[in-house]
Amino acid sequence: TDEEVARDFILFGQPDVTLVVVDASRLERNLNLVLQILEITDRVVVCLNLIDEARRHGIAVDAKKLENELGVPVVPTVARQGDGMDALLDAVARVASGENRTRPRRVDEHPPDVEAAIEELVPAILDEFPELPNARWVALRLLNADQRVREAIRSGEIGHLTGDLPPGGEPSTPMHEISESREELLDLAGRLRWTLRPDFHDALTETIYRQAHEIADESVKTGLAKVGFDFDRRLDRWLTSPVVGFPLMLGILAVVFWLTIAGANVPSAMLASLLIDSVHPVLLDIGASVGMPWWLSGFLFDGVYLATAWVISVMLPPMAIFFPLFTLLEDFGYLPRVAFNLDALFRRAGAHGKQALTMSMGFGCNAAGVVATRVIDSPRERLIAIITNNFSLCNGRWPTQILIASIFIGALAPPALAGLVSAGAVVTVALLGIFFMFLTSWGLSRTVLKGEATTFSLELPPYRPPRILQTLYTSVIDRTLIVLWRAVLFAIPAGAVIWLISNITVGGPSVAEHVIDWLEPFGLLIGLNGVILLAYIIAIPANEIVIPTVLMLTVMTLGLSDVGAGPGVMFEEDPVMGTGDLLRQGGWTLLTAVNLMLFSLLHNPCSTTLYTIYKETRSGRWTALSGLLPLAMGFVVCFLVAQAYYLVSGGV
């Protein structure tokens, strides 16, 4: 887990300084972590963040008194506004250079039997590793049967903390002698552990909590005038209410989607006009003027360039609207409330409550959601979160959902309500994804990943006014443009492949037409068509190019001479009307649209996410399951919907 990685780095990574960031408004709870870190290392600086939030709660923290209690520098900050950053960097530099010699407070008030065991074990540890700076902490970890510390003792790795071993880790004493002495040390720790009372773990925890409470009592004053605290509590009564919390959550989600759908059409058309109607002909003229062969011009400008231009024109506007809105909700503090509302449902499904957080990350990018599962301690529950994260609609699938909903679902309503109905359809698909996530988690927790759900504590952050400019920068640079760049990188080779298979012929028809004809019966069986299935095969690297690929292949199969610029040439139609007319000419119905939205939700993860899953699990088996399970569910769901439609309508 992330906690173990951090602990091991502090212990074995020899950091110059360990910076511990604590919440000034919840200091006593955070001091537990500070005291544990002070047991490991002397080089610590405490960043006392959220001082402004503490004032809102009527709390005043005496940083100097806290510094005296802890024996390490304490620097008050308001990181959001940059307050105290210079002083913090100066404190870090002084500790790193040795100019500031810290004298950290140690937890030394253990029960008599624990203290006696420590006193007997510490000399044995120092005999083996004479310069070890934190022998008492190592002794406590051995008494707690910490497997990582035991392995470090056995291998001698812990000697690197002080240079007791020469470079390369080769000891000067014969290895068999050192191994025997280390095993004797571990045996001693094991014998001493059996002499302790059964609840000594609880006693250690109580000691740390008691000292944290004493330090907080000395350095914190409460009961001052509160500013805005009552507003937070009143808002939480609504947003986390079991009665109105869920409807409000759905309403907020619907508003975000509606703003995205309503606002993306015009800038998308403007981008398409610039990149496709204006720049593309210029590139063709340049190619002709330098005598470029038709196949090279087609490959570069009609294949690679147009695929890239289409992805930019379709993806950039909705992402430039959706991600800032999503980031504003995150900055305001609402997303943790979503996790709080969903926690009970995840636990009933046999999954970890923190999966709600990784699910929220997946709505931006499934690969990021997979990496975020590191916050889940249980390997079993982490695997469940990894396998099911694909059911969160990622940014690459939002444009497809929004476009298809606008064309086919919104058309069912009066023009004045079309945007609202389209947004409702997208919200419904997103909720279906959450439902399938619960269903799959429940199934996995009772079959291949059996076990009980573990509990966790979720600390709801305070509501804070969103930082508009910083939010725009974060969402545009860190999310929109980075995701768009990734889509472009995948669109370039995909555009090349599309052009090639559309222009290489076998017995008259192109390779693409042969594949489409072969896939068509299977596509109709599940309410789709051969064009859509081929588009998804080509789009395995990135979901963003599904719609442009579908349009290009549709024009090719229809033999339309007045649409597009030729086989394998991507193009842009009016975001709703032109694209809708073209798809209907290609045989699309309401069933095709609904099943495409379902298949977009349930099909296999993109190649980037699959690679991330393999890196996180180091298992081909779990990676394969993560890809094949949603794909199989997509086929089954689409098949059932299609057969129900055919049964009601009386045929294909």
Image (tube, rainbow, N blue to C red):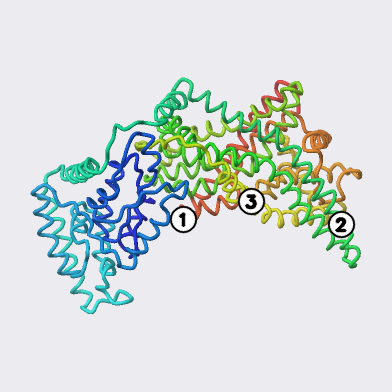
Would you say residue 573 is visible in this rendering?
yes
User: Looking at the picture, which amino acid does disc 1 mark?
Assistant: Arg
Would residue 109 appear left or right of 517 to someone viewing this image? left
Q: Nearer the viewer, residue 277 or 325?
A: 325
Give the answer, above or below, for where 514 lies relative to 152. above
Question: How many angstroms separate mark 2 from mark 1 (CA)?
Answer: 48 Å
- The quadrant of the image that shows the C terminus is top right
Location of residue 254 by image quarter: top right
Would you name the residue on which mark 2 appears?
282
Of mark 1 and mark 3, the one earlier in the sequence is: 3
Badge 1 element: loop
Would you say residue 441 is visible in this rendering?
no
Location of residue 528 in the rendering, given as x and y in whole percent from the top left corner? 72, 36
Of mark 2 and mark 1, the one earlier in the sequence is: 2
Would you name the residue on which mark 3 appears?
481
Would residue 575 appear left or right of 631 to someone viewing this image? right
Question: How many angstroms separate mark 2 from mark 3 (CA)?
Answer: 25 Å
Report if the CB atoms under discs 2 and 3 are less than 8 Å apart.
Answer: no
Of mark 2 and mark 3, the one earlier in the sequence is: 2
Residue at image position (78%, 41%) is: 269
Q: Which of 405 and 319 is in front in this view?
A: 319
User: Looking at the picture, which amino acid does disc 3 mark?
Assistant: Leu
Would you name the residue on which mark 1 appears?
618
Location of residue 598 by image quarter: top right
Q: Which of 585 and 527 is in front in this view?
A: 585
Badge 2 element: helix
The crowd level at tag 1 (other Cα within 10 Å; few <14, some 14-19, many 20+) is few
Q: Which of 383 and 36 is in front in this view?
A: 36
Report if the CB atoms under discs 1 and 3 are less than 8 Å apart.
Answer: no
Residue at image position (35%, 47%) is: 22
Question: How many angstroms separate mark 1 from mark 3 (CA)?
Answer: 30 Å
Report if the CB atoms under discs 2 and 1 are less than 8 Å apart.
Answer: no
